[in-house]
Image (cartoon, rainbow, N blue to C red):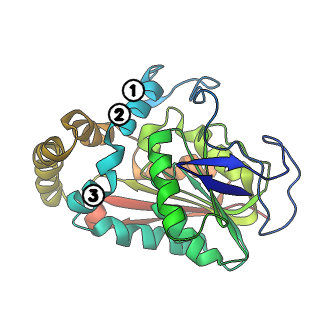
Amino acid sequence: MARVSGHLLEEEHPFGIGGASYGGAGGTPAIRPIGGGDAPAIGAAFPGTEATGSQVSYDPDKPRRVRAMFGTIAGRYDLLNSLLSFQMHKWWRRVALRECRLAPGMVALDVGAGTADMALGMAARVGATGHVVGIDFCEPMLRLGVEKVARRGLAARVQLAVGDAQMLPLADESVDAAITAFVLRNVVDVPRTFAEMARVTRPGGRVVSLELARPASPLFGRIYDLYFHRVLPRIGGLLSSKEAYTYLPNSLTGFHSVETLAAMMRAAGLQEVKVLRLTGGIVAVHVGRKPG
């Protein structure tokens, strides 16, 4: 189990890092706690792939840049999420959470937990007998998440840790469902991320992705592009970092299509893959079930 000490999580559970045996719903998977030591070398273990049209490019510096950027905007991240999405992100998250099909006593994983909004939503669904693990590579974001979890009195139920989405520090088949929200555009290797989420999910469990997408309607697409590429960076620049909120729309340009992400889920061994397009197609929820 983990507890809050100031702004950090300190290790109290008896397991080692990764690969430890995992015994039943409500237990604590083996993970590395926040604090102490350098941040993980994100992407170091795998070749970097990023979609650029029909080609694939390698960007070995992307993890460092993205981690530093999110560290810079962490303090106003939640505020701008609500402002720039007109509060819609809360509904999008609820739709994605529903697809996890969580129940009391289950163990859930949030990959790219950030400030812990999704992890807290999962905690409400798994109840007092369940457990939630949140993994992220940006410690400043997780520190805010730790504070949020503590304010709600859920430190015994929600454990946040620094980790790599492409090399999750959890044992095989240790969680009942895994979700990632607005993260895939920021990782180096999307197929590897899906493969890792599938690996740690138990047979019959669900892997869910919530991510930005391109609108299906050309007319709505033009309106959306105007807001996304012109208005959003200006608002972000006034209230936080223009560089970060210019990166946000740019990260969608050339990113994998909704159909390609679904194919990647299937390639990771997931079945019954489906896609839910929300708000005119600007957001997509991908859902896959692990066989068994």
Are the residues tagged 1 and 2 within 8 Å (C-beta)?
Answer: yes
Give the image location of residue 138, x and y in percent.
48, 39
Q: Mark 3: which secondary structure?
A: helix
Q: Quadrant of the N terminus?
A: bottom right
Say whether residue 138 is visible: no
Along the line of sight, the residue nearer the viewer: 153 or 137: 153
Of labels 3 and 2, earlier in sequence is 2
Along the line of sight, the residue nearer the viewer: 264 or 251: 251
Say whether residue 113 is visible: yes
Q: Which mark is residue 69?
A: 2
Which residue does the image show at 79% across and 42% down from the upper left?
A: 18
Q: CA distance from mark 3 to mark 1?
A: 22 Å
Please tell me whether residue 95 is drawn above or below residue 216 in the rendered image: below
Residue that badge 3 annotates? 79
Q: Quadrant of the C terminus?
A: bottom right
| Residue 247 found in image quarter | top left
Left or right, residue 212 beside residue 155: left
Single out the mark in the foreground, 3 or 1. 3
Left or right, residue 106 beside residue 228: right
Circle 3 packing at 10 Å, graded few (<14), some (14-19), many (20+), is few
Q: CA distance from mark 1 to mark 2?
A: 6 Å
Along the line of sight, the residue nearer the viewer: 143 or 224: 143
Which residue does the image show at 60% across and 23% down from the upper left?
A: 44
Q: Mark 1: which secondary structure?
A: helix
Q: Amino acid at mark 2?
A: Met
Which residue does the image show at 39% across and 47% down from the upper left?
A: 257
Please tell me whether residue 51 is drawn above or below residue 148 in the rendered image: above
Residue that badge 1 annotates? 65
